[in-house]
Amino acid sequence: MAGLIAAPRSGPSSTGVAYKANLVSYRGTGDVIINSSNEKKGVSNALTGLGNRSDVRIISMSIGDVFSNSRVRDAVRYAYGRGKMIFAAAGTSLSWTSWWGVIFPANMSETVAVTGIRDNVSNMTRCNTCHSGSQVDFVAVMQRNSNTDRTSLTLAMSGNTPSRVGGSSAATATTAGIAALVWSRTPSLSRTGVMNRLKQSASFYPSRNSQFGWGLIDANQAVQ
């Protein structure tokens, strides 16, 4: 996810969306599900710590759970109250459980929920394992229409061959990177101003789709 957002433009590997962004990384969980008490505490501490940093404007959360919890919810609200723009994954799961709607904390009003779609954007369809629903704000292409391969390139786990990732987690990181581009281009924008730029450059704007929100963002248009 860090690679999708900010991998440097150098070497044979892939380049992040906002490749010159300053990235701060906090690890609050052992995996992508916030379910143990230690993970809830870890994510809460991370959000509080990021909320208190003046050099952080955007928080990207490729984690979540189908169940909400008060500790993380309060921390999300704290970071939001400190002016942070918080992107969260709408949910990625096995195909037989992907009927579930948008997961926590992406289903909070303080977060920007993102999910993945197939590359046939003229007939928008979510990726096989991605969740969708009325609380989704944006989408990003995360799967080739012809197969189930993960198609988003990111930094290699080792060596020089890029890794492939997908799902709403990768869509979230990608969209957070686009927001970073917008804010870097116009630093004086408010959080609401950045959100409006993203909306206005998305495929469904000025309408909102019941499953995919404002739709797919045109990053080039968003930074103009």
Image: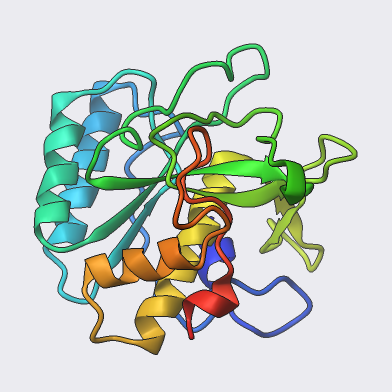
Question: Whole-percent x and y of residue 130?
Answer: 60, 31
Q: Nearer the viewer, residue 66 or 209?
A: 209
Residue 185 vertical position relative to residue 209 in the rendered view, above or below: below
Residue at horizontal 42 percent and vertical 34 percent from the top: 30
Q: Nearer the viewer, residue 57 or 35?
A: 57
Question: Whole-percent x and y of residue 93?
Answer: 58, 24
In this image, 217 relative to 147: left or right? Answer: left
Q: Nearer the viewer, residue 104 or 223?
A: 223
Q: Quadrant of residue 85?
A: bottom left
In this image, 137 relative to 128: left or right? Answer: left
Residue at horizontal 13 percent and vertical 44 percent from the top: 77
Q: Quadrant of residue 67?
A: top left
Residue at horizontal 71 percent and vertical 61 percent from the top: 156
- Which corner quadrant holds the N terminus? bottom right
Question: Whole-percent x and y of residue 41?
Answer: 20, 34
Residue 171 vertical position relative to residue 127 in the rendered view, above or below: below
Residue at horizontal 69 percent and vertical 41 percent from the top: 124
